[in-house]
Image: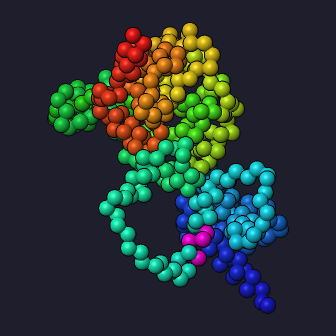
Amino acid sequence: MTGSQPEGRIADNIVYFARALRKAGMRVGPASVKDAIEAVLTAGIGSRDDFYWTLHAVLVTRHEDHATFDEAFRLFWKSRELVEKLLAMFSPVALENRERQKPRAAESRVSDALLEGHQNAAPPREIPEIEIDARFTVSGNEMLRGKDFAQMSAAELTDARKAISQLRLPFDLVTTRRFKADAAGRRIDPRAMMRASARTGGALILPKFRSPREIHPPLVVLADISGSMSQYTRIFLHFLHALTEKRRRVQAFVFGTRLTNLTRQMRHRDPDQALADASSAVKDWSGGTRIGETLAEFNRLWSRRVLGQGAVVLLITDGLERDHVYGLASEMERLHKSCRRLIWLNPLLRFDGFEARARGVRAMLPHVDEFRPVHNLNALTDLCVSLVRSPMRENDPRRWLDAGIAKAA
């Protein structure tokens, strides 16, 4: 065996590894691959950690790509765990009682990128042709969009997350008191005219115009993470991550027995890593609920910081307060007066016979602008539309208050 053969195999493997990283979403070009090969040949392979950090130093240029590189390196250069999983799928083994390990960040995307070539090279399977009558059936996409998040399987939740990332997000704008340069504007811009004339020594003065600046209003999310709301909040965080990628001022808070700010965690570009960081930052997930106390803490510490310039607040909770409701109404009133629009998203509205009988629900309803469901993909699509349009009659909270008063009488 000559000395050039192992170097050639190492170079080829690094090229294949870089292709897998590129398919998984990393920015790896030919120059980076060349530098990686030269770095490995120069530094040598003393240990697995040395080889890992040599490739990491050259191929990883963004902080959010660390999780993707780590998972790709684990699967590509040491595939024992992947082989064991494949053998376990086709071998009759006893059921394990131990708790399953949580999936790593970016694991699914890297696995798909590594196995893409094997899937394309596999011979196509012959699927028997079956004639069915589809006149009274519903497409799988429609069934998925109308299915409750709490009743979805793991595969359906994965499809739901992909559908959420493809939602048409709201493009709502508010007019500010500041101005921007606009050739078609209706207002004269004296400063721009003077600056332009100064360049010609005042010999030529041309009119300049401006128009009011339009921006996206701040969006603040307060999500309940108690036991009854855990599944819905996890799905909504994927929707919130998609919003954070498209809008600048998005603030995310979750509450159970305490208030936790997840704005920094949700700004990570990798959705898997963002949700992993959010889960590790929250200490009271799937616990109790103290709506009044957490709203009081938000109004005291965060209201003036994040609720400005026509902010919209999305409150996600079922309204089932565990403690007393004496201060809940006053805190809701203060929150309502601090923002331009307060939308309450309640998964209990999935039931046709829902009535505002709980004390927490009746204390909160008078201080919200809209009362909407949040239990499936159709509800999220309607929410995106409602952020652009004016409130609809069917989402008026007075409907449920008037119905409860009529039944009580």
Residue 27 x/y as whole percent: 54, 60
Residue 90 x/y as whole percent: 70, 72
In magenta segment, residue 176 = no
Residue at 56 percent across and 56 percent down: it is 155
Instruction: Answer yes or no: is residue 250 visible.
Output: no
In the foreground, 21 or 51: 21
In the foreground, 122 or 274: 122
Residue at 65 percent across and 78 percent down: it is 12
**With 25 as the anchor, is 308 left or right in this view?**
left
Residue 181 x/y as whole percent: 27, 34
Residue at 35 percent across and 21 percent down: it is 399
Residue at 72 percent across and 80 percent down: it is 7
Which quadrant would the C terminus be assigned to in this image? Answer: top left
Which quadrant would the N terminus be assigned to in this image? Answer: bottom right
Instruction: Answer yes or no: is residue 344 visible.
Output: yes
Residue 370 x/y as whole percent: 38, 25
Q: Which residues are magenta?
A: 114-118
